[in-house]
Amino acid sequence: MIHMRKEAEKKHFPIMRKSLACLMDIIIKATKPRNILEIGTCIGYSSLVMYKAMGQRGQISTIELDYDLACQARKYFKMAGADRNIFIYNGDAGEILEYMDGVFDIIFMDGPKGQYLSYLNHCLRLLRPGGLLVCDDVLFYGMVANDKIVNKKKDTIVREMKKFLKIISNHTSLDTIIIPLGDGISISYKKGG
């Protein structure tokens, strides 16, 4: 895993921050999920963090748009002996989620930030009652919390993320907290469990 982090730093791949890796380790050990869905694989670092926290049991389904990154992730999963427990879908998450079925204990969203809102209904359909939706980078470089620092090129993403946070914070099926850890994490509990 250290070697993956070094490669990510060298090639500027956006992988899970150490602080979020620690938080996910605690969440997973406490909740003991059997099935996790991840949106945004990159090179597979976060998948392996979650797999390790699961005690190398259970299943992870992960979605990655970029073919080369998906191939790298597969390579790392095989090296870690996790390739039978982590299944990677290569393609557009919106399209894949539309046809996905099953029930997940945790959904970890770390894909394209401007698409979080479009993924939400699929996530709510796939997340079991009592399950957790964990979303990374919800404060988007601080721009979501501070209008004065919004980069004009990122205005649409910031606007979409604000809508997403408003919806999950007021959704009747969710209890949500936003934590200013890293670039912002939201954790939503699906009621009814």
Image: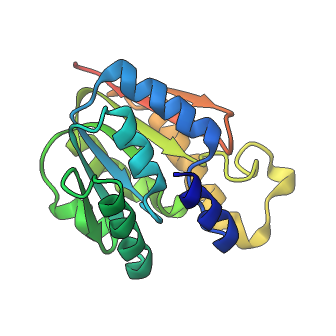
Q: Is residue 105 left or right of residue 79?
A: left
Quarter in which the C terminus is drawn: top left
- Tell me which corner region of the image, top left, top right, bottom left or bottom right, holds residue 90: bottom left
Q: Residue drawn at (41%, 72%), measured in percent from left and top?
A: 72
Q: Is residue 160 left or right of residue 155?
A: left
Count of numbered badges drawn on the protein = 0
Question: Is residue 175 something that shows in the picture?
Answer: no
Nearer to the camera, 72 or 147: 72
Q: Is residue 81 left or right of residue 167?
A: left
Q: Residue drawn at (73%, 73%), measured in percent from left and top?
A: 153
Residue extending farthest left: 102
Q: Residue drawn at (32%, 33%), measured in percent from left and top?
A: 54
Residue extending farthest bottom: 68
On screen, residue 119 above or below 34: below
Residue 13: image location, x then y, percent: 60, 67
Nearer to the camera, 41 or 7: 7
Q: Is residue 67 left or right of residue 130?
A: right
Residue 150: image location, x then y, percent: 79, 59
Residue 180: image location, x then y, percent: 69, 33
